[in-house]
Amino acid sequence: MPQTVPVSGQSRFKALTDEQWARVEPLLPSNEGHRGHPFSNNRMIVNGIIYHYRTGIPWRDLPREQFGPWQTVWKRHRSYARRGVWDYILSQVVGQAD
């Protein structure tokens, strides 16, 4: 499996460039108007999800310092998958590429 080399100056924990994040961020749902804690750092959570799939490590082994509690990352991923958020983001990004 080919290894990806981080762009110069980019952390191996940062999966998306600023340009890529600018495309994805507006497509993510917010919890505005919902009960509970507001979504804190969405970018950190999405980077954690990408890191999990890139490395193949168990959710419990996600580095907490970089991505926060693994439970939060896992729950957000599960919620987005169940609600079709990832499918929506993929369709929008592919549509922008065309």
Image (cartoon, helix red, strand yellow):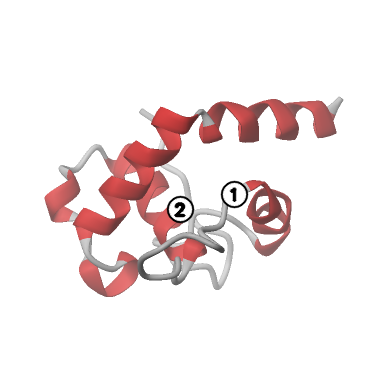
| Residue 77 x %, y % | 37, 42
Name the residue furthest right: 98
Say which residue label 2 marks.
46
Of residues 68 and 3, the one nearer the viewer is 68
Sort mark 1 into few (<14), some (14-19) or many (20+) by Cα contacts within 10 Å: some
Residue 97 located left or right of residue 47: right
Residue labelled with disc 1: 28
- Alpha carbon separation for disc pair 1 and 2: 10 Å
> Taking 10 as reference, is 85 above or below it?
above
- Going from the N terminus, do you reach mark 1 or mark 2 first? 1
The three-letter amino acid code for the residue at tag 1 is: Leu
What residue appears at the point 74 percent right and 27 percent down from the top-left corner? 94
Q: Give the residue at x 51% y 62%.
A: 43
**Residue shown at 73%/50% (left/top)?**
23
Front residue of this view, candidates 5 and 31:
31
Relative to 47, 51 lies left or right: left
**Numbered disc in front, either 1 or 2:** 1
Q: Is residue 10 above or below residue 98?
A: below
The answer to which of 61 and 76 lies nearer the viewer is 76
Can you give x and y, in whole percent of width and height, for residue 4 in the image?
46, 45
User: How far across and down, in percent of the image, does residue 54 sit?
Assistant: 36, 40
Answer whether labels 1 and 2 touch (C-beta < 8 Å). Answer: yes
Judge whether 31 appears above or below 87 on screen: below
Compared to residue 77, the image places residue 26 above or below, namely below
Q: Quadrant of the N terminus?
A: top left
**x and y percentages locating residue 73 in the rendered image:** 31, 53
The residue drawn where x is 56% and y is 57% is 30
For mark 1, give the secondary structure: loop
Q: Amino acid at mark 2?
A: Val
